[in-house]
Image (cartoon, rainbow, N blue to C red):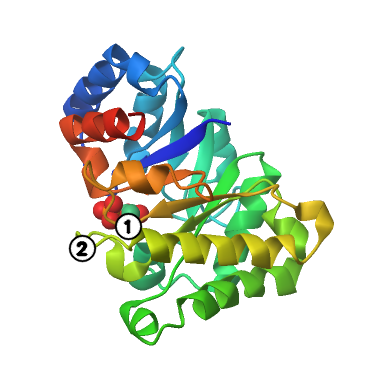
Amino acid sequence: MKKIIICNWKLNGNKKFIKKYIKILKKNKKLYKNNKISISPPIIYMDYTNKLIKNTNISLTSQNVDINLKGSFTGEISAKMLKKINTKYIIIGHSERRLYHKEKNNILLKKIIITKKVNITPIICIGENINDYNLKISEKICKKQLKYFIKKKGIKIFENIIIAYEPIWSIGTGKNASIKHINKINKTIRKYINNKNKKIKNKFKIIYGGSVNKNNANKIFNLKNIDGLLIGKSSININEFLKIIKNINK
Ligand code: PEP
């Protein structure tokens, strides 16, 4: 099965940058013929990017979504609107949104539900902070984050979704989690969900995010338990990103 690579550009880019990036990416399509690449630009450039990636195997990811489909919700964007422009994935619960926008589990759950409702795949980010990591309670924290959703909606909430394991201390810091740590947490998450109900068994994916770059991508990407990567900083520079996709397929 093809593994997924999500490029989270965060609040970066403009039309000129995107045009050039997609042009180079298209030229190098052989490099990622065995992977699924999805670009996540700022929302204002989603439709522009959508047009540029037409007839390619590159897809579109949204960095956010509202909990409502329409109505008086100034400044928001709906899952239906995102669906209309061919959005394939929506990132939910990124640590930057949890931190800067105070998004809590109850809001995240609503976002997951509305995303699934329009047949877009949610990418739910979970992960421990540096204190949890130092206290060696990463597994406990990740399970606790997942447990909230299970308690509220049952295990089926995880059917056909992607869980992004993103240790907060690793995002944008240049410090990736060790292979041993990533492996351990991924196994724990998989086992935790699989053990809840036989029906859910492996009907979800787990990807890793946190300071992935051209030097560490190969080892992380090729871990047996990992279904892909969520890349921030290193996905913004097209030359660095091409090196990553070259290296993971070596
Ligand atoms: C992210 O934004 O989800 C991320 C993993 O960022 P970075 O690759 O820069 O650590």
Image quarter for ligand 1:
bottom left
Give residue 52's position: percent from left, percent from top.
Answer: 35, 18
Residue ID at (62%, 64%): 109
Label 2: few (<14), some or many (≥20) within 10 Å?
few
* Residue labelled with disc 2: 173
Residue 211 is left or right of residue 61, and the answer is left
The answer to whether residue 42 is seen in the rendering is: no
| C-alpha span from label 2 to label 1 | 8 Å
Q: Which of the 4 quarters of the picture holds residue 20?
A: top left
Give residue 5's position: percent from left, percent from top.
Answer: 41, 38
Tag 1: residue type?
Gly
Give residue 78's position: percent from left, percent from top.
Answer: 54, 46
Residue 191 is left or right of residue 174, and the answer is right
The answer to whether residue 46 is seen in the rendering is: yes
* Residue labelled with disc 1: 210
Q: SS of the residue at dot 2? A: loop
Of residues 103 and 238, which is closer to you in this image? 238
Residue ID at (58%, 57%): 111
Task: Find residue 1 and name its label.
Answer: none
Could you tell me if the residues under marks 2 and 1 are in contact, i.e. CB atoms within 8 Å?
yes
Tag 2: residue type?
Thr
